[in-house]
């Protein structure tokens, strides 16, 4: 019998954990697989760990957990879970039941056909989300798909079931700055997306503030594209050409009319400020990439485990 590993990152989810487990069990017990759970407690400040311990004590063979020494972020939690999972198939789920468990049998059956290596899910609507947020996220997908060779599917969630082969490929990507949407796409394999309607979380609150999403978006772009660096090249080229033209104009004016009055203090200041600003912008872009190199070469662990059962 095949084994299915369910990887569940949890951060401050004390209310969701006790609801999640029975909801998933109801579905998977009808499937023809053995199941193991890998909950990852991502440094929660509430009683999530206690809830996980309780679950583990009730089902010591089936339910396992990893508890981090602090909050390392969902991407790190996901990576830890994938590393721990031993199943022939691995599925990543949110604990807030926004990823409907009813999809599991269908995902599994589709993988069994051998036509696919990964069954992902894609939200087709965004009910219950602010208009401006949907708009910005649409812009983000358009932008990143234009400038990056790695295609990111709009609305795709991390809820996906993968074969062992694909999981091993994802585990090979040991980068520190982990943008999962990009990583899953980068490794290739045949992915099918199931559409579904947005579901609100059962309990607790999402801690994705707009500012956090912005940073996430920039990280995604910087991790999977070098296009922003080209901005520096373009700005540099354009101002170089403009300055050559300006220089020629000054020389010609001096030859034609050596006694011309000096003028243009205001335009000079504007030009200096403009060029200065553009230079800082370009240095900033380069700085972001240098920062990522810095984090990577330090080669720090992606997460630190405090407790594992
Ligand atoms: N999560 C995590 N670490 C974090 C933030 C979130 O492990 O730092 C988990 C969270 O418990 C949930 C999943 O990642 O199971 C998705 O988080 P959330 O529901 O807040 O995101 P959304 O569904 O709004 O994208
Ligand atoms: Mg959620």
Image (cartoon, rainbow, N blue to C red):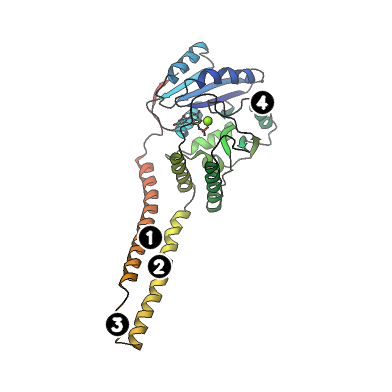
Task: Identify the image quadrant of the C terminus.
Answer: top left
Of labels 4 and 3, earlier in sequence is 4
Labelled disc at residue 278: 1
**Some atom of ligand 1 lies within 8 Å of the CB belonging to the residue at label 3:** no
Using residue 167 as the reference point, say whether residue 238 is left or right of it.
left
Residue in the picture at 35% in, 84% down: 253
**Some atom of ligand 1 lies within 8 Å of the CB belonging to the residue at label 4:** no
State how far apart marks 2 and 3 are (Cα): 26 Å
State how far apart marks 1 and 3 are (Cα): 30 Å
Of labels 1 and 3, earlier in sequence is 3
Q: Is residue 263 above or below residue 82?
A: below
Residue in the picture at 61% in, 27% down: 100
Q: Do residues under tags 2 and 1 come within 8 Å of each other at their CB atoms?
A: yes
State how far apart marks 1 and 4 are (Cα): 54 Å
Q: Quadrant of residue 157?
A: top right
Q: Residues within 10 Å of mark 2 (few under 14, many from 20)?
A: few
Of labels 2 and 3, earlier in sequence is 2
Task: Identify the image quadrant of the N terminus.
Answer: top right
Residue annotated with mark 2: 239
Q: Do residues under tags 1 and 4 come within 8 Å of each other at their CB atoms?
A: no
Of labels 1 and 4, earlier in sequence is 4
**Mark 1 or mark 3: which is in front?**
3
Residue annotated with mark 4: 105
Q: Residues within 10 Å of mark 3 (few under 14, many from 20)?
A: few
For the residue pair 28 and 190, the one nearer the viewer reads as 28
Q: Do residues under tags 1 and 3 come within 8 Å of each other at their CB atoms?
A: no
Residue annotated with mark 3: 261
Q: Is residue 5 above or below residue 155?
A: above
**Some atom of ligand 1 lies within 8 Å of the CB belonging to the residue at label 1:** no
């Amino acid at each position: 019998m095949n084994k299915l590993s369910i990887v569940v990152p949890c951060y401050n989810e004390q209310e969701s954990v006790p609801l999640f487990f029975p909801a998933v069990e109801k579905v998977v017990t009808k499937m023809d697989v053995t199941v193991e759970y890998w909950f990852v407690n991502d440094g929660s400040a509430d009683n999530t760990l206690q809830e996980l311990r309780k679950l583990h004590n009730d089902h010591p063979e089936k339910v396992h957990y990893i508890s981090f020494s602090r909050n390392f972020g969902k991407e790190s939690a996901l990576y830890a879970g994938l590393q721990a999972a031993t199943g022939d198939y691995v599925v990543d789920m949110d604990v807030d039941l926004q990823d409907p468990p009813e999809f599991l049998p269908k995902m599994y059956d589709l993988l069994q056909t051998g036509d696919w290596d990964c069954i992902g899910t894609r939200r087709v609507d965004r009910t219950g989300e602010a208009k401006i947020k949907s708009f910005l996220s649409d812009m983000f997908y358009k932008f990143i798909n234009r400038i990056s060779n790695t295609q990111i599917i709009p609305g795709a969630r991390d809820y996906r079931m993968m074969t062992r082969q694909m999981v091993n490929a994802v585990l090979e990507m040991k980068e520190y700055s982990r943008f999962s949407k990009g990583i899953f796409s980068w490794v290739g394999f045949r992915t099918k997306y199931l559409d579904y309607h947005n579901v609100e979380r059962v309990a607790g609150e999402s801690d994705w503030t707009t500012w956090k999403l912005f940073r996430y978006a920039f990280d995604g772009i910087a991790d999977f594209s070098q296009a922003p660096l080209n901005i520096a090249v373009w700005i540099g080229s354009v101002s170089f050409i403009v300055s050559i033209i300006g220089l020629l104009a000054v020389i010609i004016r001096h030859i034609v009319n050596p006694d011309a009055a000096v003028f243009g203090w205001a335009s000079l200041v504007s030009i200096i400020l403009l060029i200065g600003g553009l230079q800082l912008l370009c240095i900033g872009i380069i700085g972001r990439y240098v920062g990522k190199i810095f984090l990577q070469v330090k080669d720090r662990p992606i997460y630190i485990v405090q407790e594992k059962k």
